[in-house]
Amino acid sequence: MATEVEVHVHVQTHDGIGLIRLNRPEKMNAIGALTRQQLAEAIKQAERDEAMRVVVLTGSGRAFCSGADVTEMVQGAGMRTPEDVGNVLRNEYMPMLTRLRTMSKPVIAAMNGPAIGIGASFALACDIRIATPESYLLEAFVNIGLAPDGGVSWLLPRLAGTGIAYEMFFTGKPLSAADAHRLGVINRLVPADRLEQEVRELAGQLAAQPRGALAGAKRAVTHALESTFEQALEFESYLQEAQAASPEFAEGVQAFLARRAAKK
Amino acid sequence: MAYEHILVEIETPIATVTLNRPKVLNALSPDLIHELTSALADLDADESVRAVVLTGGQKVFAAGADIGDMADRSAVDQLSRDQTGRWAPLAGFSKPLIAAVNGYALGGGCEVALMCDMIVAGETARFGQPEINLGIIPGAGGTQRWPRSAGKYAAMEVMLTGAPVTAQRACELGIVNKVVPAEMTITIAKRLARQIAEKPPLAARMAKEAVLKAFEAPLAEGLASERKSFYFLFATEDQKEGMHAFLEKRKGVFKGR
């Protein structure tokens, strides 16, 4: 008898928008071993699939993602030793978070609720965050005697500054959506009943933008965050040469001169 | 001469050699090595060519040797075939040779890149020596050229773990000159070649020889050899042209004489 595999991560593509939805509402979308496996597949697919011009990452139910499935961790499903914890971070989360941050297309976090622990990492590794006022970011590690992981030691100081990052890491207290919005960590605050529509509108707009130009922006930022100002300027100049030779640029200029919308 | 496994494009004063076995990720077969080394011998002899770009194209540089071809060979087979020894003409190429690397440069592919004088890498390039995973070690200079450029510790890590490094990391380690957008790698390498091709070719040749000597000889010997080349260049027409052009505030025109 074939056993039915639970769907922890739901993926669908519509009008150029790839939607990755964590699908464990009864567990506040906590991430267990099966979730990791399915999420890794979904993110890999999103990176490769040309039909997905924009990627949206979201949760189902009340939370965006409540972090690692601690119950599962304690019961020892694959994370029995401290080394297991490290291996999961290095072998599973690292490639997923790296892909989200570097794939050459926009990735939007639609924060339908709290993003906690590794859940906050996933939200912060996206390019843009749109959140409901009820949502928040929480680096809960200290509350169970752990240090930060999932890239937040890199991401949060860059997005919010070291002061806010340290306060979150040291206190284990949440950063409200309103505060995160004020700090620029969250791009837009949208009431829960309008979140889906707002995200779809933005994703739709981005899906209609010239693909190479958006990819160029991500490649430039990815490179710049690892280089000096001079190296970034040089890399940009080469990227711009490539883009200036593209049909996207030719069409963009023609449309500008003819005062019409560019064909996408 | 027509080639099966490589493409040779001459746009004087530069030439571009492209490894062209995309279906097997440019695996370095004996036939390919033969074609490449004989093409380079021709380009070395061609006075109209002053710098050369070596590339594997847009997707991959070269993902190593042909494992299928080697798996069941004996040590004696390998010795008598001396596949890795056949790279000598590449390492001995007298003109500036620039590698344009996109995608994987693994095993022999990485070693070939390291035999070049400069390396321009696309942002997605990966450099590595995965031989250890197959129960062998690099055989075309990897164990010698890595530590000379990247130092002992980085070289050990690459040899012993078999894990490749990113273009950015390779740049930090000093085995890549520049990391560029992948679609621009070959263009930028060609520009660099053209820039170098404008220089007096005898001086370029002596400069290359002198720098390579630093890896072979004790300092005193290297300095003596450098000094001889320095004086020798005063016997060339290009030195007279270069210095007079400088004094007359014009651009020198060099003939390689």
Image: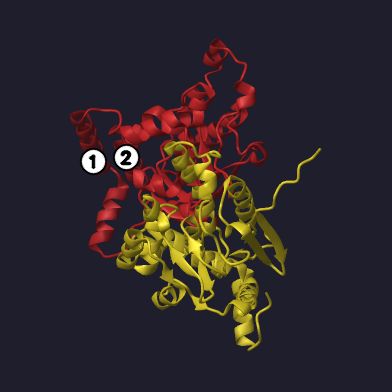
Residue B38, image x, y percentages: 55, 32
Res B161 seen here? yes
Residue marked by disc 1: B230
The residue drawn where x is 52% and y is 19% is B82
Residue A165, image x, y percentages: 35, 63
Instruction: Specify the colour of chain B.
Output: red
Residue marked by disc 2: B206
The one nearer the camera, A34 or B172, is: A34
Q: Are marks 2 and 1 in contact (CB under 8 Å)?
A: yes
Q: Secondary structure at mark 2?
A: helix
Judge from the rendering whether residue A223 lies leftward or rightward of residue A37; answer left or right: left
Residue A250, image x, y percentages: 62, 74
Q: How is the image coloured?
A: by chain
Q: Quadrant of the C terminus of chain B?
A: top left
| Neighbourhood count class around disc 1 (C-alpha, 10 Å): few under 14, some 14–19, many 20 upward | some
Amino acid type, label 1: Phe
Q: Secondary structure at mark 1?
A: helix
| Neighbourhood count class around disc 2 (C-alpha, 10 Å): few under 14, some 14–19, many 20 upward | many
In the picture shown, does residue A166 fall above or below B143? below
Instruction: Specify the colour of chain A.
Output: yellow
